[in-house]
Amino acid sequence: MASAWRVQSQGQSSQESREKEDRRKESRSEQGCGEERREESTSSQAPPEKDNPQTEHPIILTRLFSYTDKVFGLRKQWKLRVSDSRPKAQIPTAVFPAAFFAMFSCRLPSFNELEQHRKKSSWRHWLCGSALPSADELAYASERIDPQGLRECLGHVHSRLKRNKVLAPRHGWMLAAIDGHETISSYKRCCECCLQRKVTVGDTEKIQYYPRIYHLNCSTI
């Protein structure tokens, strides 16, 4: 009798432990479902994202524009010195150097890439209150801007850097680096400043036209 009672009690205890384990599993699964429902409800109730002016226009680019205006007064210099030969121009000339500066600062490869940012209202402040010109307008104006005015602006930047002792000479000497680039080439179009070279394309020999640009960079030690 005693052995039978022990076997029965062990069977009841093992059954109770299995029932407890099943209850724990059910409670865990219910908690998981509840958490999933809460996540779905919070995601469905989340407000739609709005255009953030900081993501629309990077902070570092805004700081760069503010710095160039404060230290060098670039936009003021462009208004005073830069001119172009467009007849009946509707867009101020100073807008285009500002757009070119923004393009190179953002490392955009082309005017078409720059045109993709026309809808951003934050560009208006940098572009003297005007909208960003289209790619065709940028190309048209770039061919007619007087380069002498741009050179005078570069001279102003150089003199301001020397005044602020950024380009201070060392032992009476200034350090400069001369570099050359070939930006474009063509087999059909050329100008009086283009160089020529013979290039073998397949089995034929063609004349390629290309401009070579040299620039001098002043730097500090």
Image (cartoon, rainbow, N blue to C red):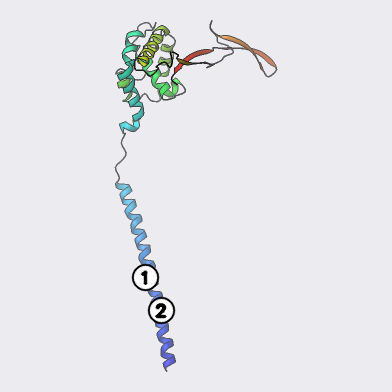
Residue 177 on image: x %, y %: 49, 16
State the residue in front, 100 or 149: 149
Mark 1 element type: helix
Residue drawn at point x = 35 percent, y = 66 percent? 27
Mark 2 element type: helix
- Above or below — where is 52 with respect to 203? below
Tally the marks: 2
| Residue, disc 1 | 23
- State the mark number for residue 109: none
Residue drawn at point x = 51 percent, y = 13 percent? 214
Residue drawn at point x = 42 percent, y = 83 percent? 11
Q: Amino acid at mark 2?
A: Gln
State the residue in front, 33 or 9: 9
- Above or below — where is 149 with respect to 28? above
User: What distance separates the C-alpha of mark 1 from that of mark 2?
Assistant: 12 Å
Quadrant of the image occupied by residue 172: top left
Residue 145 on image: x %, y %: 41, 9
Q: Mark 1, residues whose alpha carbon is within 10 Å: few (<14), some, or many (≥20)?
A: few
Q: Work out whether residue 57 can be spotted.
A: no
Sequence order check, earlier mark of 1 and 2? 2
Residue 124 on image: x %, y %: 31, 21
Residue 180 on image: x %, y %: 53, 15
Q: State which quarter of the image contains the C terminus.
A: top left
State the residue in front, 175 or 177: 175
Q: Work out whether residue 19 can be spotted.
A: yes
- Above or below — where is 1 with respect to 50? below
Residue occupying the far right of the picture: 203
| Residue, disc 2 | 15
* 82 sits left or right of 186 in the view: left
Residue drawn at point x = 41 percent, y = 79 percent? 14
Q: Amino acid at mark 1?
A: Arg
